[in-house]
Image: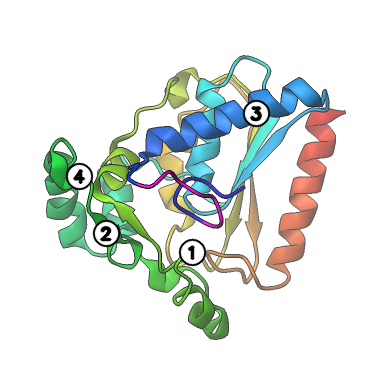
Amino acid sequence: MDNLGYGLTQVKPGATPSYDDWVDLVVDFLAYEQSRDDRPIVLYGLSAGGMLTYHVAAKAPRGALRGIVAMTFLDQRNQQVRDESSHDLLTARIGAPFMGLAARTPAGRPMYPMSLAGKMSALANNPDAMKVFMKDRISAANWVSVRFLDRYLNYAPAVEPADFDACPVLLTQPVEDRWSPHHLSLPALSRIIKVPVDTVMLDNAGHYPLEEPGLQQLQDAIADFVTHHTA
């Protein structure tokens, strides 16, 4: 699903969504789906959507989800995660605290290019795909508010990983991911001990796992996970 500020989702003119709104929107979407369909729900998150699945599972009512799957779980409160996934070290160490101050003033409303906030150049390993992504204003060429970036970097989940027991977790990690390699998911996943946590490595795949055999491995891993936890 497209979230606020991305894709084809329309946002009210003058509104400045924050990352908190992203979490609330998906929680509300789950409630809506459950009101009309009693089939079990599993969330999958790509890129920043990965940690979003965790934040939603931590906040959603008990039993709302049977599982969460992501290609990365980045807890941006961790300094190493922030250092390695930001556009550069200066942005991580100086830009992020500045955004925190600006977000509490009218200066939090101006828009900031995502290509300068994160390692958008590592979004995909396919050069032709990157040419498309980097021209797409509703995708990689998008701009978000300073307020959004501050909340994304500092969001505290409703339940911390050490106490998380909402549902099983699956990490589908691209082996050739140059933006969020496997070790950056460990600060979050290593603390989840009350539910099963599994990892499947996607061979030859980049951050957006377009390549084979990783793409097929992704499909198979999700199918197995869903079958096992929704039977």
Which is closer to the viewer, label 3 or label 4? 4
Magenta span: chief secondary structure: loop
Q: Which residue is mark 3?
A: 30
**Which residue is disc 2 drawn over?**
112
Amino acid type for the residue under numbered disc 4: Gly
**For the residues marked 1 and 4, what is the alpha-carbon distance in whole angstroms?**
21 Å
Kindly report the distance in space between the C-alpha atoms of the residues bearing marks 3 and 2.
30 Å
Write the start and end of the magenta stretch as one range: 7-13
Where 54 sits versus 110, above or below?
Answer: above
- The residue that appears at 54% across and 50% down in the rendered structure is 9
Q: Residue at x 51, y 49 (%)?
A: 10
Name the amino acid type tagged 3.
Leu
User: For the residues marked 1 and 2, what is the alpha-carbon distance in whole angstroms?
Assistant: 14 Å
* Identity, as a three-letter code, of the amino acid under mark 1: Ser
Specify few, some or many for label 3: CA neighbours under 10 Å numbering under 14, 14-19, or 20 or more: some
Quadrant for residue 204, please give it. bottom right
